[in-house]
Amino acid sequence: MTQGENSKFQNPILEKLDSKLGGLLSKVAIEEDFTRKAGQSKVIWVADLGPKRVSLIGLGKATCPSTSGFHVFGESVASVAKATQANTVAIALASSEGLTSDLKLATTSAIAKG
């Protein structure tokens, strides 16, 4: 979620998504004080842009969160989905840096169990 001096995300995935959403992610990150705390979430309504909403859900500030951290993340996804009465959910991690193939499988499992 690190942003440069021009409020652009340094992460290319977040930058591309923010661009597609007309800068809404940048605004939410700044104006809503999204600090990435584990379980913290912000829901952005974007019905005119494709999906009905996009949610930012924090994993915490660890460089590479543990599987238990991803389990909490999965619980947060389920909680947001239930609160917004979502019928379908797609998850995109802004970075899988530091995750080996085995860890990616464990991470996916932990998110699903959460």
Image (cartoon, rainbow, N blue to C red):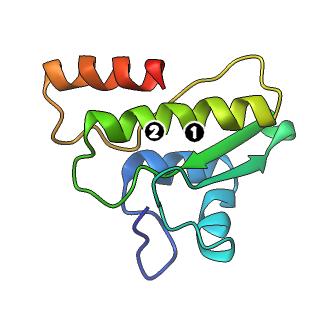
Q: Position of residue 10 (x, y in %)?
A: 37, 62
Amino acid type at mark 2: Val
Secondary element at image label 1: helix
* Residue at 18% in and 33% down: 99
Q: Position of residue 32 (x, y in %)?
A: 68, 71
On the question of residue 46 being in view, the answer is yes
On the question of residue 51 being in view, the answer is no
Q: Tell me the crowding category of disc 1: few under 14, some 14 to 19, or many 20 or more residues within 10 angstroms, Cα based.
A: many
Side of 35 where 33 appears, left or right: right
Side of 90 where 4 appears, left or right: left
Amino acid type at mark 1: Ser
Q: CA distance from mark 1 to mark 2?
A: 6 Å
Q: Tell me the crowding category of disc 2: few under 14, some 14 to 19, or many 20 or more residues within 10 angstroms, Cα based.
A: many
* Mark 2, residue position: 72
* Mark 1, residue position: 76
Q: Position of residue 60 (x, y in %)?
A: 39, 56
Side of 20 where 105 appears, left or right: left
Q: Is residue 15 above or below residue 109?
A: below
Q: Position of residue 40 (x, y in %)?
A: 57, 55
